[in-house]
């Protein structure tokens, strides 16, 4: 199985390491033709406005917009901003794959970044039979301000949604690739199978 990682900018290498650890061949995606054989794609953390600029420069914007409508996709931090239907603070365009409203840099500046345990939904416990807490690494993180009724919450932090899913599309405002655990990557791969 081949899983892509959008590799125009941002935290690509940590996701590659996680996928390789799980026996998956990661494909760095920079051009439209690289989407063709993928089981799914990860849109990593980074800077969403820079990613949008580079997506358009590489003629990847519209092919990716089409890809994320039908194939398993996981947006992390800036990637979750790319997937949101509505982006605020300030407004910017997006791939509009998930019916959520997301506020950029809502937790503050770089020096206000933090790590904390997350609370999960019962669906997560069905998938991973573990009592071990999942850590969330929040770095200049966005906040999910609203979500449609067909978007389910997978993880919360202090009663706020921080990871959501609709069908095979995931968005997380924290960075699972920066922890020791591979369980969220395993969950995404289960959607790609």
Image (cartoon, helix red, strand yellow):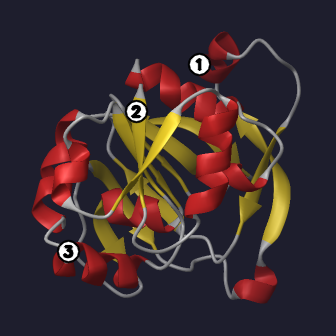
Tell me the element at label 1.
helix
Tell me the element at label 2.
strand
The numbered disc on residue 26 is: none
Residue sitting at x 35%, y 36% = 40
Q: Earlier in the sequence, mark 2 or mark 3?
A: 2
Quadrant assignment for the N terminus: top left
**Horizontal side of residue 167 vs 191, given as left or right:** left
The numbered disc on residue 2 is: 2
Residue 147 in the image: x percent, y percent? Answer: 38, 49
Q: To which residue does mark 1 refer? A: 123
Q: Earlier in the sequence, mark 2 or mark 1?
A: 2
Q: To which residue does mark 3 refer? A: 58
CA distance separating discs 2 and 1: 26 Å
Q: Eyeballing the image, is 169 above or below 93? A: above
Q: Earlier in the sequence, mark 3 or mark 1?
A: 3
CA distance separating discs 3 and 1: 38 Å
Q: Residues within 10 Å of mark 1 (few under 14, many from 20)?
A: few
The number of discs equals 3
Quadrant assignment for the C terminus: top left
Residue sitting at x 44%, y 61% = 79
**Residue 19 lies in quadrant:** top right
């Amino acid at each position: 199985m081949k899983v892509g990682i959008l590799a125009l900018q941002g935290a690509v290498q940590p996701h590659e390491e996680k996928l390789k650890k799980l026996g998956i061949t990661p494909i760095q995606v920079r051009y439209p033709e690289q989407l063709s054989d993928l089981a799914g794609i990860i849109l990593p953390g980074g800077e969403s406005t820079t990613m949008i600029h580079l997506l358009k420069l590489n003629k990847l914007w519209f092919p990716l917009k089409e890809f994320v409508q039908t194939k398993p996709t996981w947006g992390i931090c800036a990637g979750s901003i790319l997937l949101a239907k509505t982006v605020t603070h300030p407004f910017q365009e997006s791939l509009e794959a998930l019916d959520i409203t997301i506020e950029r840099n809502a937790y503050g500046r770089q020096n206000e970044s933090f790590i904390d345990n997350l609370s999960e939904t019962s669906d997560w416990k069905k998938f991973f039979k573990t009592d071990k807490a999942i850590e969330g690494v929040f770095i200049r993180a966005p906040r999910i301000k609203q979500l449609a009724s067909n978007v389910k919450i997978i993880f919360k932090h202090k009663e706020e949604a921080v990871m959501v899913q609709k069908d095979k599309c995931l968005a997380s405002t924290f960075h699972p690739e920066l922890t020791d655990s591979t369980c969220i990557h395993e969950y995404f791969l289960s959607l790609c199978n």
